[in-house]
Image (tube, grey):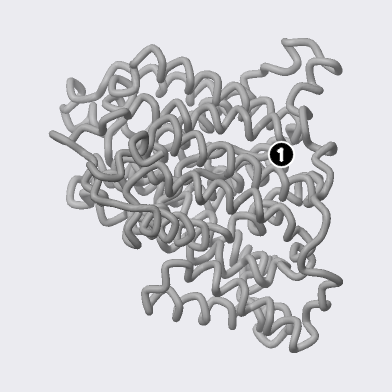
Amino acid sequence: MNRYFRFDELGTNYNREILGGLTTFLAMAYILFVNPSVLAPTGMDEGAVYVATALAAAIGTIMMGVVARYPIALAPGMGLNAFFTYSVVIGMGIPWETALLGVFVSGIIFIIITLVGIREFIINAIPAELKYAAGAGIGLFIAFIGLQNAEIVVMSEATLVDIGNLGAPNTLLAVAGIFITVIFMSLGFKGGIFYGMVLTALIGVAAGVIATPNAIVGSVPSLAPTFGAAFTPFAEMGLGEIFTIELMIVILTFLFVDFFDTAGTLYAVAHQAGFTKDNKLPRAQRALLADSSATSIGAVLGTSTTTAYIESSAGIAAGARSGFASVVTGILFLIALLFSPLLAVVTESVTAPALIIVGVLMASAIANIDWKRFEIAVPAFFTMIAMPLTYSIATGIALGFIMYPITMVCKGRYKEVHPIMYVLFVVFILYFVYLGE
């Protein structure tokens, strides 16, 4: 074990790796409760999604640790789960089973392009500013959903949105949760979001806003409601009915967001740990293969796209340097299967602060965009602003990809636009034409 994970070479030991794995788990354990809450509006069984989330995280993280030997954890991604629910299932009216099929297919495509080795080619085709804008836009979208779930922002006939009744018990609890989480994060707590959810839930129970749970530890919920549901469309519809232009756009969006989110997270975390050499990540193909495989496995289990988590940096800061830390994190996700009764106390008032704070962290990508160049600012702005305002990540990406070639051509910089961007320009134009029919 010591030799396989290269403890001596990396200057680490079991104690540091176990502490690092535990720290990473605490930093991202919130996803166990937030993911079922985000996917619930689709009609998916929350207990089954809880199990699927824990298993997908455990399998993906252990694969990352054993195959790629990196201390990087995986779990169903924030933003991608919101896109799955609000853009695909609710917005487009696609059944959640078919949406899971889209996630599965995107994972398979990711595996293929990883094995073929065209990762760098695709990454270089998309301008960095649009990647940053997509990440920031998803952050704004997630925060908007959190504000809605907390009823801090409510619907208004006059102005579309308005501030809610902050004195309402559930809303007041969510507001308290936001302040608590902000305090934890500001003080540098590695698991600040998770601790914020725990304390908010305890306050809610003590105040009588949330019912006291019957148990803390219980039996593992059945996975049957979601397991293999991704393949049910084949039994009910023909290929032509399943793989519509609409679903192909969905698959493309899943692939796009996961691809760059994973690449960005892997390189950011690896750079922090000192793994990168000459701006390259050793064993990058193995890491990307573990991530893409976890996406397809997660879809079969019954959850949205599984991806690498930036919270892994918390574990690295605590001393993790090898894949053994990821094995520890994965085992902890398996143990977490026994704590499903706590789903009863993790209401929208408890999860809303987590969504808002994650949104804040993702929106920080705005700083990387060159706003002084108008031809860059316009597509970046449309990408970001359209996501929360149209309630669709896909629409934001589509508008940004349409505006980018236009502004660059008008600026006389058409030679700097990769041919793939012109192809995507046409694809997304046809997408909007299709939606308008």
Establish if 6 lies above or below 269.
above
User: Is any part of residue 385 visible from this angle?
Assistant: yes
Question: Few, some or many C-alpha atoms within 10 Å of disc 1 (few <14, some 14-19, many ≥20)?
Answer: many
**Residue 368 shown left or right of residue 347 in the figure:** left
In the rendered image, which quarter is residue 249 located in?
top right
Q: Quadrant of the C terminus?
A: top right
Q: Residue furthest left?
A: 278
- Residue at image position (41%, 52%) is 312
Q: Which residue, given by chain and number where applicable, does mark 1 sit on? A: 89
Residue at figure coordinates x 55%, y 46% from the top left: 330
* Any part of residue 383 in sight: no
The number of discs equals 1
Is 361 in front, or is 227? 227
Quarter occupied by the N terminus: top left
Residue type at mark 1? Val
Name, please, the residue furthest toward the front: 2
Q: Residue at x 84, y 37 (%)?
A: 224
Where 154 falls versus 2 (above or below)? below
Q: Nearer the viewer, residue 408 or 88?
A: 88
**In screen coordinates, is 384 left or right of 100?**
left
Residue 224 as seen in the image, left or right of residue 246: right
Location of residue 102 (image quadrant): top right
Q: Is residue 338 left or right of residue 65?
A: right
- Does residue 297 lie above or below 24 as drawn? above
- Say what secondary structure mark 1 lies in: helix
**126 is higher (above) or lower (below) than 43:** above
Q: Nearer the viewer, residue 87 or 343?
A: 343
Where does residue 58 sit, x and y in percent of width and height?
Answer: 58, 43
**Residue 310, how many percent across, how many down?**
40, 51
Where residue 71 sits: x, y (%)? 39, 46
